Amino acid sequence: MSEAAQPAASGLREAGPQRMPSVEIDRSALVRNWRRVAARQPNARTGAAVKCDGYGLGAAEVARALHEAGCRDFFVAWPEEGGIVRQAIEALSDTPESRIYVLQGIEPDAIELFRQERLIPVLSSRDDIAIWTEGASRPGDRPIAALQVETGMNRLGIDDQDLDFVAALVASGDLKTGLLLSHLASADESREQTGSQFRRFNEIAERFPDVERSLANSAGVFCGPEFGFELTRPGIALYGGRGSLPDDCGIEPVATLTAAVLQIRTAKAGEAVGYGGTVRLSRPTRIATIGMGYGDGYRRALSGDHAATRPDLPTPSAFLHGHRVPILGRISMDLVLLDVSDLPEGRVQPGDRAEFFGPNVPIDEVARAAGTIAYEMLTGLGPRVYRRWSQGTN
């Protein structure tokens, strides 16, 4: 197995001391997920959302892996992210050209970066369009942009009252665009809203007859072949988040979060555990103290003392020596306590690593227990969490 550390600004994240928390990222699983998503829309190109540092796992390494697998369309939020992706891809040998879209528009002081890194801005307003057409064009050179239109999410997008103006700019050649996109608000929840957005997007696309279209995010890919258009842009599914995707989606875990046992102790029945003494033990209990906490992105909402008040949610636990073991008491900034009483005495030793999400503890289950989503569990991983890339199995 070959391994590579994901570069980061923090020396802690680069050094990866053995006892610190780490997330192992399976490169092969990432590529398999991308290919499985692509197979759902065989008539469309399949891009990849690599924003927020590749959903917290390392945008450069994600982009390289997916580019080598055949991905040619990447989506980021900011031009600085786009520059990282461009440089990572161009470090590969014999690199075919890729398109890198910046979803959050453009500012005048970023135009040179867009041109230098050959980034494509996604324009969502008349102001965006004015900045781009006035600032980026050179004599005989009108760089291409993408257009985002509002279809029902009320977040970013060109509004209805500006569509005629924008369509006229495109028709005249004053605005060169190669992609029209919008974003589905609830493809994994509401068929009614998704259908309404789909119909509205089709109506708008008729005004831009020669422009490629993109609507489907991860959940949208599974809404039907008509959602593929020319380009899809999955995100969380690539990184192992299944959410409410169909059972046969084939999405597998990519990231495995582990942390080390620092100490094992036995507490007596009736003693309190953790901050606030919120848990009192009903039996003699062996406790494994783990070197990870909410300061590393493992949510305080996963504290064991919350379980009694939320029986409808999964019980927070970790996987250690082949068994699920419950979290005890409150999670602190740097530490988590596990009840290992049901494991054979002497089995758990300092240095053993417990899995907090991964193949044995699904990330979506952990997210539900924390009252959040898999996106936040991944992007919230802190700089002390060492990113370790492995080749995995093909």
Image (cartoon, grey):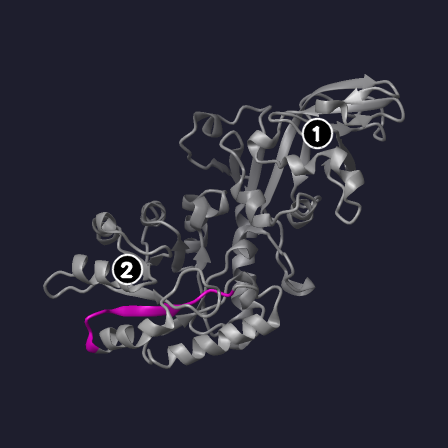
Amino acid at dot 2: Asp
Relative placement, left or right, of 372 versus 57 is: right
- Would residue 5 be counted in the magenta stretch? no
Using a 10 Å C-alpha cutoff, classify the residue at mark 1 as few (fewer than 14 neighbours), some (14 to 19) or many (20 or more): many
Relative placement, left or right, of 369 versus 68 is: right
Q: Are marks 2 and 1 in contact (CB under 8 Å)?
A: no
- Relative image position of residue 231 (x, y in whole percent): 43, 68
Amino acid at dot 1: Arg
Q: Is residue 274 visible?
A: no
Q: Is residue 179 visible?
A: yes
- Residue shown at the point (60%, 49%) measured from the top left: 374
Residue indicated by mark 2: 128
Position of 233 relative to 292 (above/below) = below
User: Which residues are drawn in magenta?
Assistant: 172-184
Using a 10 Å C-alpha cutoff, classify the residue at mark 2 as few (fewer than 14 neighbours), some (14 to 19) or many (20 or more): some
- Residue shown at the point (37%, 81%) measured from the top left: 206
Relative placement, left or right, of 209 versus 295 is: left
Residue in front for this viewpoint, 300 or 81 = 300
Mark 1: secondary structure: loop
Report the disc number at residue 330: 1
- Relative image position of residue 336 (x, y in whole percent): 68, 28
Q: Quadrant of the N terminus?
A: top right
Mark with earlier residue (2, 1): 2
- Would residue 180 be counted in the magenta stretch? yes
Give the quadrant of residue 289: top right
Distance from Cα at disc 2 to Cα at disc 1: 47 Å
Report the disc number at residue 391: none
Mark 2: secondary structure: helix
- Relative image position of residue 190 (x, y in whole percent): 61, 68
